[in-house]
Image (spheres, rainbow, N blue to C red):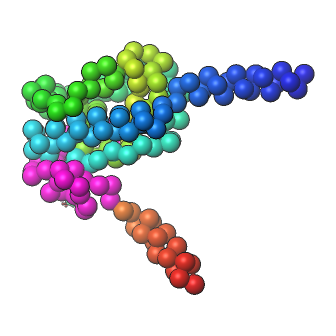
Amino acid sequence: MHIYIVLLGLFFVSVEASYEVSETEKNDLLMRYNHLREDVAKALFISNMHELTFDRMLIDRVSIMSCHEYENYISEIPEDMELLQSKLQGVTLTIPVDGYGVVLNLYNAYPPQTKLGCIHSKCKGSFQCILGPEEKLSSSGFVEGMPASNCTASTGLMCKPSVTAKGTLFTIILSIIHFI
Ligand SMILES: *[C@@H]1O[C@H](CO)[C@@H](O)[C@H](O)[C@H]1NC(C)=O
């Protein structure tokens, strides 16, 4: 009896694991997403485009979405952003995203996002990715201006995620403990 439970457990673990992306794929996806975002920031003069990093919680979240849920989630674009969406069509990407299941759209180019979570696709395309931490897109998320001029910290044309007050406190406490 126990052996069956263990085997069943192993089966589910391996099914889950087959959707996991490798470190190489993660880096490749990050590179393509960040180039796309940088190209959009340059072309549409966006001052608050953030660089993305990989996030475990988003990976887990996209893993449990059905294809239908996923499609709805990534295509919810507010009506007042349709003009922006049409402007995006004129942007030329320096690094292609074809074949990655990555699309040049407002969802992927939403400036305030700092996190990316991807799995091997269970639906269309090669990969299924979601962005965070913002749940909903809003036109106020696009701040016009010189790229990276609306950041607290930046690398090139994009903002680095700002260090939160909590994060700073944590770092200070760690340094004090280290010092003692
Ligand atoms: C970013 O732009 C918004 C809206 O114009 C402004 O209120 C905010 O102070 C700016 N933040 C930084 C860090 O420049």
Residue 157 placement (x, y as % from top left): 17, 50
Q: Which quadrant holds residue 76? A: top left
Q: Is residue 67 above or below residue 80?
A: above
Q: Which residues are magenta?
A: 134-162
Residue 98 placement (x, y as % from top left): 27, 21
Q: Quadrant of the N terminus?
A: top right
Q: Which residue is found at the position 21% from the left and 31% from the top?
A: 95
Farthest residue toward the top?
124
Farthest residue toward the right?
1
Q: Quadrant of the C terminus?
A: bottom right
Main structural element of the magenta stretch: helix, strand or loop?
loop
Q: Which quadrant holds residue 9? A: top right
Residue 160 placement (x, y as % from top left): 29, 55
Q: Which residue is found at the position 16% from the left and 38% from the top?
A: 39
User: Is 53 in front, or is 81?
Assistant: 53
Magenta-span inclusion, residue 70: no
Quadrant containing ligand 1 reads bottom left
Q: Does residue 15 appear to the left or right of 47 in the view shown?
A: right
